[in-house]
Image: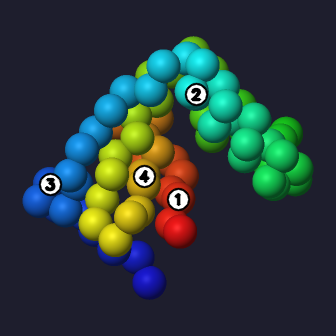
Amino acid sequence: MFKRFSSEEVSAQNQVKASVQCKIWQSIAEEYPGLEPVLDDLLPKRSPLIVAKCQNHLNLVLVNNVPSLFQHP
């Protein structure tokens, strides 16, 4: 059920700009309105946000180098 990722499985890591971070925050709030009260805890607006691209089109969202969310097509 849970998978560990090794550095070989991560193809790229990019710190996103503040505008992209805001769009990610807004899209999650629209998609999952029940998360909005705790969304600031999951994705703090002032913390650096990194998106790691992994195999099989999986994206991990890292907050302070800790996986917080993932996107799978």
Q: Marks 4 and 3, how far apart in space?
A: 13 Å
Q: Marks 2 and 4, how far apart in space?
A: 13 Å
Q: What's the residue type where badge 1 is placed?
A: Gln
Instruction: Kindly state the secondary structure of the residue where label 2 is placed.
Output: helix
**Nearer to us: label 1 or label 3:** 1
Disc 3: which residue: 7
- Residue 37 as seen in the image, left or right of residue 57: right
Residue at image coords 63%, 37%: 24
Disc 2: which residue: 21
Residue at image coords 41%, 63%: 58
Mark 2 vs 1: CB contact within 8 A: no
Rendering coords of residue 5 (x, y %): 25, 63
Nearer-N-terminus badge (2/4): 2
Nearer-N-terminus badge (2/1): 2
- Residue 63 as seen in the image, left or right of residue 22: left
Rendering coords of residue 37 (x, y %): 85, 39
Q: Marks 2 and 1, how far apart in space?
A: 14 Å
Disc 1: which residue: 71
Nearer-N-terminus badge (3/2): 3
Q: In front here: 65 or 16?
A: 16
Query: Can see residue 23?
Result: yes
Question: Mark on residue 61?
Answer: none
Rendering coords of residue 15 (x, y %): 37, 27
In the rendered view of the protein, which quadrant contains the N terminus?
bottom left
